[in-house]
Amino acid sequence: MSRNKRRNKPIKINDKIIRGITKSGFRFSVDSEVFKDMEMLELIGEVDDNPILMPKLLEKMFGKKQKDNLYDFVRDYKGSVPIEKVSEIVKDIFESKELKNSLSLPR
């Protein structure tokens, strides 16, 4: 399967794990239960006003290993991790229909 076809693959929820590939080609998996955590909800709400919380949000959402994989995925030739590329990938993940559906709060 070509890389372009994989990029457009829909995100799936299997066994409470959300898996997908972003538009830029980053493969990820997130436990949907993390979005039922009040601390995660606070981080999501605070990160727009305080971008310095983004690494903490990423580690809570992905875990350290996958956060490091994301950083390596966007790392440039100088070894820097561009904030705008990380933000674009996170935005892409949060805008997915499947993830939004998993964020519904219990009644």
Image (cartoon, rainbow, N blue to C red):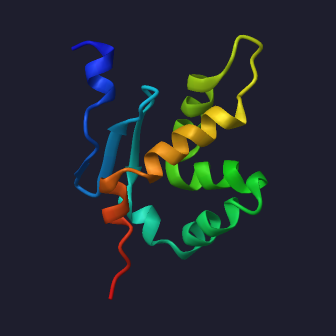
Query: Residue 23: horizontal and vertical position, in percent?
Result: 42, 31
Quarter the N terminus occupies? top left
Q: Position of residue 96 (x, y in %)?
A: 37, 50
Residue at left offset 77%, top offset 13%: 78
Residue 6 to residue 66: above or below: above
Residue 34 location, x and y as percent? 45, 63
Return the residue nearer the eye: 57 or 1: 1
Q: Give the image quarter of residue 4.
A: top left
Q: Is residue 27 left or right of residue 45?
A: left
Q: Residue furthest bottom?
A: 107
Total residue callouts: 0
Q: Looking at the image, is 40 positioned above or below residue 29?
A: below
Tell me: residue 96, above or below residue 88.
below
The quarter of the rendered structure image containing the C terminus is bottom left
In the picture, residue 9 is in which quadrant? top left
Left or right of 22 on screen, residue 76: right
Q: Measuring 59% from the left and 49% from the top, which residue is drawn there?
A: 58
57 w.r.t. 72: above or below: below
Q: Is residue 79 left or right of residue 12?
A: right
Which percent across, then down, holds residue 81? Answer: 71, 28
